[in-house]
């Protein structure tokens, strides 16, 4: 068969351009997201690692496993209920009423989402401890020598609930924006007041969104390491994450097959939560309003000052006071000494910057976060383009697989990477275990989903007519992507890169099992200092981390406004 010369030149070019982008994105997702999880699935039954059905049965029947399982389930369910009450309530008050300063209130509501779990736990420990200057000031301080009440199951549940309430808040806020305004207006015209409208119309329609947020809060709670380690271990309330950490930290790679079984239990619980979330969002999307006016805020009338006062009081106590207590501990001259204007000192901050290990951890965290954010930005743009514009099964599969490392508890990814990279890479002889590179590989897989969502939102905002016009003019897929899609989607992808930096800079759940001497991270140092009893130094490091996080969040907000990014690209945008 004779092929025309023009066609023979166009066909390979077309195939190469499309396969280059899609093939590169597929390879990235397969190597960094899918391969480690597949290795985890194979480990429990691998005979050459001490696995097998007998070992699986023994681990499942062990008393430590059953205790940790039921504690994890208890903490997950109870904290989820608290997160729904707090997050759902705040979303309704802030998003559905005429309270003032809604943008600022939204940001404060989402502060627990920006502050890492280990820093939040340390802040609450300082607030509720015997050395708390704030509680002493109002006469509610714990007596010296008395056990901190947060070292208990109740403390773990309380902190996990507050930590994950922003997830319910975001889900509920999205649900509120999708509610049909005509139902609320009809109820108003019929004489219904605000409370009745909320109870009879808003809450029933908001139920799928609340359920989706609750599922996310549950998955995050059972996989949380910072809170369960800092509060649960001293409080003798073991959970699956801390059981995995203590087994692997105590016995090393010899128990990898056993901790893989524990990780599979955790993955099963998380998988159930993720399926519930997908089902709930499906129901929410079916009932969402299409092309209707935005829901008008419910007037508070003479109750506005009271509602605003209660709202600011609650947020001040739960979001701002712990950070103030953390700052007080960082300024205290020594452990057990109250912080006053006369005794406050910056010695702990000076010690942080004079400590080479601390500076190395700061450098490692900054490097990991920067590289993860930059690589995520580069990969997310073409991947988002294929997921949004191509409805093929491969595009949907890439979307789901990219979500898995971030949706599942981070400790599962840690174990997966240890299993995959414990031995040198075949054919290369290069070992990643106990090195900086295993941290980077884990981060590249973990945070891809976080950079992908904003990029997908940016691509979805592009008018398809622009790309169609370029296609008619003869531009190939690669030319259309670089000339049209990439410039328009780049600001949203950059915002995703900033989100990755925020999440990776203070990360602990993944790093707790992957760090090694010389390759410490900021989150690991906060945890180690607290575990050693050096809470003042840990507080100083935490304050530095919080200030850096808030500075990046502010920069991301300014960038988002300047680039006119669509709402929702940054979670705190209102």
Image (cartoon, rainbow, N blue to C red):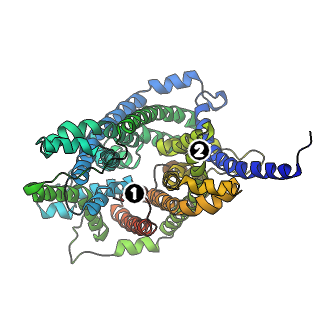
At x 14% / y 44%, what residue is drawn?
A: 189
Residue 327 horizontal/vertical position (percent):
29, 67
At x 50% / y 60%, what residue is drawn?
A: 492
Specify the farthest residue to the right: 2
Q: Position of 481 compared to 243: left or right?
A: right
Residue 349 horizontal/vertical position (percent):
38, 72
For label 2, the SS is helix
Q: Work out how far the residue at label 2 is from the one at label 1, CA to CA, in angstroms.
A: 28 Å
At x 51% / y 65%, what residue is drawn?
A: 366
Residue 440 horizontal/vertical position (percent):
59, 55
Classify 470 as above or below 252. below
Q: Which residue is mark 1?
A: 567
Residue 375 horizontal/vertical position (percent):
59, 58
Q: Which residue is mark 2?
A: 33
Specify the farthest residue to the bottom: 342
Q: Position of 147 compared to 568: left or right?
A: left
């Amino acid at each position: 068969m004779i092929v025309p010369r023009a066609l023979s030149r166009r066909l390979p070019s077309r195939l190469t351009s499309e396969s280059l982008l899609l093939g590169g994105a597929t390879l990235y997702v397969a190597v960094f997201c899918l391969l480690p999880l597949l290795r985890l699935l194979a480990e429990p039954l691998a005979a050459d690692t001490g696995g097998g059905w007998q070992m699986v049965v023994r681990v499942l029947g062990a008393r430590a496993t059953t205790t940790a399982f039921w504690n994890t389930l208890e903490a997950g369910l109870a904290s989820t209920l608290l997160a729904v009450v707090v997050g759902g309530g705040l979303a309704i008050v802030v998003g559905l009423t005429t309270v003032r300063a809604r943008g600022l209130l939204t940001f404060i509501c989402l502060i627990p989402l920006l502050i890492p779990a280990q820093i939040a736990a340390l802040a609450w420990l300082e607030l509720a401890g015997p050395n708390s200057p704030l509680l002493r000031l109002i006469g509610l301080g714990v007596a010296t020598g008395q056990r901190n009440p947060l070292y208990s199951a109740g403390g773990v549940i309380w902190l996990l609930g507050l930590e994950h309430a922003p997830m319910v808040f975001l889900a509920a806020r999205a649900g509120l924006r999708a509610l049909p305004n005509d139902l609320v207006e009809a109820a108003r015209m019929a004489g219904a007041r605000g409370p009745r409208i909320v109870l009879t119309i808003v809450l029933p329609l908001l139920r799928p969104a609340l359920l989706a947020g609750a599922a996310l809060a549950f998955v995050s709670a059972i996989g949380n390491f910072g809170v369960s380690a800092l509060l649960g271990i001293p409080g003798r309330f073991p959970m699956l994450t801390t059981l995995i950490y203590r087994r692997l930290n105590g016995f090393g790679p010899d128990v990898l097959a056993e901790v893989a079984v524990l990780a599979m239990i955790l993955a099963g619980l998380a998988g159930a939560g993720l399926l519930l979330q997908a089902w709930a969002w499906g129901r929410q999307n079916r009932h969402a309003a299409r092309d209707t006016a935005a829901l008008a805020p419910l007037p508070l009338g003479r109750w506005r000052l009271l509602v605003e006062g209660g709202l600011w009081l609650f947020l001040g106590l739960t979001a701002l006071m712990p950070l103030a207590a953390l700052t007080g501990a960082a300024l205290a001259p020594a452990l057990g000494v109250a912080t006053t204007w006369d005794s406050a000192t910056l010695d702990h901050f000076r010690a942080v910057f004079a400590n080479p290990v601390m500076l190395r951890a700061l450098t490692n965290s900054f490097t990991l976060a920067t590289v993860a954010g930059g690589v995520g930005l580069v990969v997310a743009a073409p991947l988002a383009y294929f997921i949004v514009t191509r409805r093929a099964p491969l595009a949907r599969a890439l979307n789901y697989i990219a979500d898995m490392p971030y949706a599942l508890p981070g400790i599962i990814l840690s174990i997966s990477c240890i299993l995959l990279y414990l031995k040198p890479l075949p054919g290369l002889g290069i070992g990643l275990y106990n090195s900086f590179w295993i941290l980077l590989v884990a981060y590249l897989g973990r945070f891809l989903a976080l950079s992908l969502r904003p990029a997908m939102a940016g691509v979805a905002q592009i008018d398809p007519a622009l790309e169609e016009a370029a296609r008619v003019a003869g531009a190939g897929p690669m030319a259309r992507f670089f000339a049209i899609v990439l410039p328009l989607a780049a600001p949203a992808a950059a915002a995703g890169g900033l989100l990755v930096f925020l999440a990776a800079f203070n990360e602990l759940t993944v790093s707790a099992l992957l760090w090694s001497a010389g390759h410490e991270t900021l989150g690991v140092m906060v945890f180690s200092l607290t575990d050693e009893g050096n809470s003042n130094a840990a507080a100083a490091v935490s304050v530095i981390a919080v200030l850096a996080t808030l500075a990046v969040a502010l920069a991301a907000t300014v960038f988002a406004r300047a680039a006119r990014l669509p709402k929702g690209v940054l979670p705190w945008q209102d």
